Each structure stands twice: as structure tokens, then as C-alpha cells.
Image (tube, helix red, strand yellow):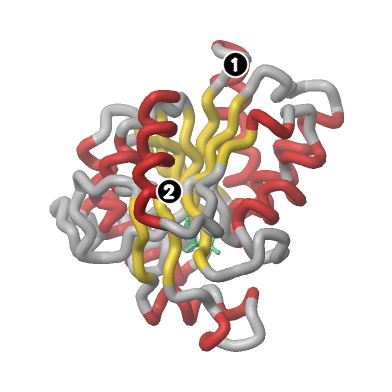
Amino acid sequence: MQIKVTKGAAESATLAVDLVAGALRAKPDLNFGLATGATMVGVYLELVHRHQIGELSFAKTKAYLLDDYVGLDADDPRAFASVVEEKFCDLVDIRSESVVAPNSQATDLEAEANKYETLVCEAQIDFQLLGIGRNGHIGFNEPGTAFDSKTRLACLSLQTRQDNAGFFSSVDKVPKRAITQGIGTILRAKKIVLIANGAHKATAIRDAVCGFPSEASPASALQNHSDVTVIADREAASMLNSC
Ligand code: GLP
């Protein structure tokens, strides 16, 4: 694992996008894994900026979403597919047919999850963006998830629902389920860049980076991967000194 400590969210986004830019230079037809959450908003802003100044093109890129809520209308602005569309895909030159997401409206959600697993594995993600939950979750893989888990229908913990309540009118309105790539699925990506900002992520980052890999910290599974960069601002990295 490579650890990069930044002064704050803006520098974290710049650094993450520098890595995306390098990957795109090497492989313009990048299979790009997209994540959501507040942390990613700055990353998408920077990606869009670099596109607008002519530095980055996604014309040959295919994008794959990490996860999405179950139970929201397809056009709900809080659905991750809508967020990624609004904040990134609609603002760059990626072709709309090149953006792939699990269909969280499917009548058979288990079958849809299996289908998405096959699709993501066949594609082989070159570069995966990742955030981290306060409890160490990646995607919607909550503590206790097996490291070899596949894409599936997962239940959100109360903490995760509370953390995401700001996007809804109350915690009761936060969906209880999601389709998420499994930890095993995420680990198949060739390169993974995890970004964390803020003191509320410090414990999760400490456990992910220097804790013994354990299902109690889903992100600690990343220690088993050969190409992971963790970009953490000073606050999120503040508990790494004691490692
Ligand atoms: C959600 C997403 C995760 C993301 C996490 C962190 O739970 N499923 O993929 O990492 O939020 O979000 P934030 O960046 O808002 O802290």
C-alpha cells in the first residue's frame, strides 16, 4: 500500500486525478471503476475541470459503478447512477452507452447482482476509485463481509444509514439495501485508489492501513492487493503515526 497524506480535500482530489490522468495516458480505453459519496464530489469536479481544459478525454473509457441503493426510483437524484451521471458523465465526453451500473430496479435483484458480477469481472477494472465509510466499509460491504465476497444484495448498517442521512430527509428514508460489488470483486481491479478526508475517517484509515486484516474492517482487505494507493488528508491520516 502506498500512503499519500495531503493538506486537505482539494489536494486529495488533485492527487487522485493525477493518478487517473496517468492511467488514462497509458490506456485511453480504461475500464474505470466509479464510486460515490461526498468524498468523490471533489474528485469529479477535478476530473471535469481537467476535461474542460483539454487535458483528459474519456471518449474511449468505459465506466463501471461500484454500488447503488435499492428502493429509489430510477430517476431519483440520490441514486448513485444519477449522481455519477450528473456530476461526471454528463459533463465529460464519455459515451452514455459506456457507463455501466447495476439495475437496482430489477425484479430479481439477486440475479441482477450475479449478472453485474460477471460483467465487471469480464471487463477487468483497470482503475478503481474508492471511498471509505466511517466504519471501514468499501462499496456497501459492511463490517463482517467476507473478503472473497461477490457482487450481491447487501444490507446497510445503521451507522452507514445515519452517515448518509444528510442526503435524505431523515435516516428512516435512507434505503436499507443496496447492490454492491463484493470485496472480492473490488480486489480484482488492477489498481485501486482510496480517498479519505476528515477526522471522522481517522479510525477507519488506521484500521485499513495498519490493522491486522480482518472482516471487522472491510477496507483492511486492501492490504492483500498489490497496487493500492491511499490518499488521506492530514485529519484522516492522523492516527497513522501510532501504527
Ligand atoms: C457510501 C458509499 C461508499 C462510500 C461511502 C463514503 O456508503 N457506498 O462507496 O465510500 O459512502 O462516503 P463519504 O465520502 O460521503 O464519506
Q: Nearer the viewer, residue 211 or 106?
A: 106
Left or right of 165? Residue 138 is left
**Residue 228 figure quarter:** top left
Which amino acid type is shown beneath numbered disc 1? Asp
Q: How many marks?
A: 2
**Quarter of the figure that contains the C terminus:** bottom left
Which residue is at a point 57% across and 37% down the rendered structure image? 100
Quadrant of the frame with the N terminus: top left
Residue kind at label 2, given as amino acid type:
Glu
Disc on res. 29: 1
Report the disc number at residue 112.
2
Position above or below: 219 against 192: below
Q: Is residue 8 visible?
A: no
- Which residue sits at x=73%, y=23%? 56
Residue 225's x, y, as percent?
26, 34
Q: Report x, y in % for residue 162.
A: 48, 81
For label 2, the SS is helix
